[in-house]
Amino acid sequence: MPLILVGGLIFGFGLAYSHMARPEVVLDFLQFDDLGLPFVMFGAAIVSGIAFAVMPRIRDGAPLTGDRYERRLKPFDRNVLIGGGIFGVGWGLSGICPGAAYASLGIGNVTILWALVGMFAGAYLQGVWRSKRAAADSGPASAD
């Protein structure tokens, strides 16, 4: 998928160019010392909003998959609240989110590997927990 690679490179370049791949910039924002991050996020939200509003009118389906454009509404439940809280705490402690962590590696920040290990460990543990929960919810089969 060369298009995905190009999109990832553009995204990574944008993060590096705006200095959002540097955890200290994000931590400075969280301490109200540098308010550049909201401008970067606002710019991304504008581009995304325009794309989500315009693309369904231009094309019938997504370019890569051909699937129809439609909204996927997910319920706001306990999992969303807990997951968002964990993501926010991790972001605040490390100063980096997953996409920016990869871009940070690209600009030579090797110590960010610790944050990536934590992200992968958390994702793995969540998968194990969810699998065990699904197995428990299905319950044992009766031996009648």
Image (cartoon, grey):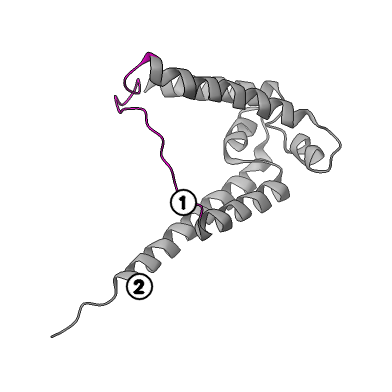
Q: Secondary structure at mark 2?
A: helix
Residue 136's disc is: 2
How busy is the neighbourhood of tag 2: few (under 14 within 10 Å), some, or many (20 plus)? few
The amino acid on which the numbered mark 2 sits, given as a three-letter code, is: Ala
Along the viewing direction, whichever of 89 and 119 lies nearer the viewer = 89
Regarding mark 1 in the picture, which secondary structure is present there? loop
The location of residue 37, given as percent across then percent down, is 73, 31
Residue type at numbered disc 1: Pro
In this picture, residue 5 sits left or right of residue 116: left
The residue under the point 63% across, 48% down is 114
- Tell me if 38 is positioned left or right of 45 in this view: right
Count neighbours of disc 1 (C-alpha within 10 A) and say few if under 14, some if 14 to 19, many if 20 or more.
Answer: few
Q: Position of residue 74 (x, y in %)?
A: 44, 47
Q: Nearer the viewer, mark 1 or mark 2?
A: 1
Residue 97 in percent (x, y) is at 62, 41
* Residue shown at the point (83%, 33%) measured from the top left: 34
Magenta span: 58-76
Residue 75: image tag: 1
Magenta stretch: residue 117 in it? no
Vertical placement of 31 versus 141: above or below? above
Towards the viewer: 111 or 139: 139
The chief SS type of the magenta part is loop
Q: Which numbered disc flags the more N-terminal residue, 1 or 2?
A: 1
Q: Please identify the quarter of the rendering in which residue 69 is found.
A: top left
User: Quadrant of the image for the C terminus?
Assistant: bottom left
